[in-house]
Image (cartoon, helix red, strand yellow):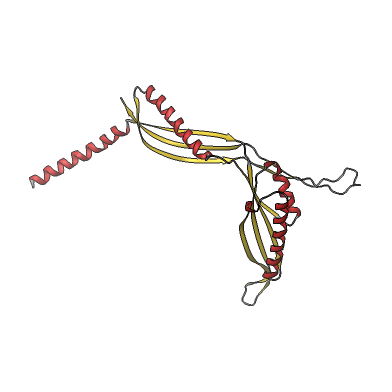
Amino acid sequence: MKMNRIICALMAVCLAILPVASLADSSRSVTVTGTATIKVEADSAVLSLGVETNAKDASDAAAANAEAVEKVTKALQDAGIAEEDITTNYFFVNAIYDYEKMNEDGSASIRGYRVSNSLSVVVKDIDKVGEIIDIALANGANNCDNVSFRANGEDLYDQVLAQAVREAARKAAVVAEAAGGKLGKVISVTEQYGSYSGVTFERAAAEEAMDGAMSAKAFGTSIRSDDLSYSATVTVIFELTD
């Protein structure tokens, strides 16, 4: 019985000491956040151009869609887009339901089918992005899901991530010196988030002549790319030494 009391007492002392030791260890570190941003000019764009066709029969909708996509693809190639820069994003066949005409079992009747085919188009001359969109729309494309810009070369996000870590190290050194200590080894590094942005997409409306004598005049699609902005943020914990 006496031995059990001694063991329990020793365990209680150890448990009391552990939090203090942990607190002492944690007080010998410095935690900082580093953020970096770089901006580069875009040198290419990726367009998502689509064709949707409707018909009573699914096969008719698919045939019409294939014909339209073939026409769009040829027009894009004639405009200088390489065959390997035109690929399929997605292809869907969906029923079109008529909820005003219900079947005997209570389900909506099918009044036709819709086929959607989206193409991913890489444009390597960003000055021609608006022109390429107009060519696609004039030759059968009837939607543009997205326009994104990119910059080729080395992995830009890796570059900005490394800069964020260096910025964290710089800040930690300042804090350590101000606290009268020295910066030790890295204990941990956590990537918080990263991002990039930079595109403006405008479709100009048709303009009628002031005197009404001329028909509506349509302007081309205007696409402007801002500089691509890549950002990264990291949290780094350094050991703080004497």
Count the marks: how many? 0
Give coordinates of residue 185: x percent, y percent: 34, 32
Vertical placement of 117 versus 24: above or below? Answer: below
Residue shown at 74% from the left, 49% from the top? 134
Residue in the foreground of this view, choosing between 26 and 15: 26
In this view of the protein, can residue 141 be seen by the observer? no
Q: Single out the residue that lies furthest toward the bottom.
A: 104
Residue shown at 62% from the left, 36% from the top? 41
Residue shown at 65% from the left, 59% from the top? 117
Vertical placement of 152 versus 83: above or below? Answer: above
Quadrant in the rendering for residue 129? top right
Specify whether 139 is left or right of 151.
right
Vertical placement of 72 versus 100: above or below? Answer: above
Give coordinates of residue 30: x percent, y percent: 37, 31
Give coordinates of residue 98: x percent, y percent: 68, 69
In this view of the protein, can residue 116 be seen by the observer? yes
Vertical placement of 20 versus 207: above or below? Answer: above
Residue in the foreground of this view, choosing between 177 and 50: 50
Quadrant in the rendering for residue 33? top left
Residue in the foreground of this view, choosing between 125 and 32: 125
Quadrant in the rendering for residue 237? top left
Q: Single out the residue that lies furthest toward the left.
A: 2
Residue shown at 84% from the left, 48% from the top? 216
Specify whether 63 is left or right of 215.
left
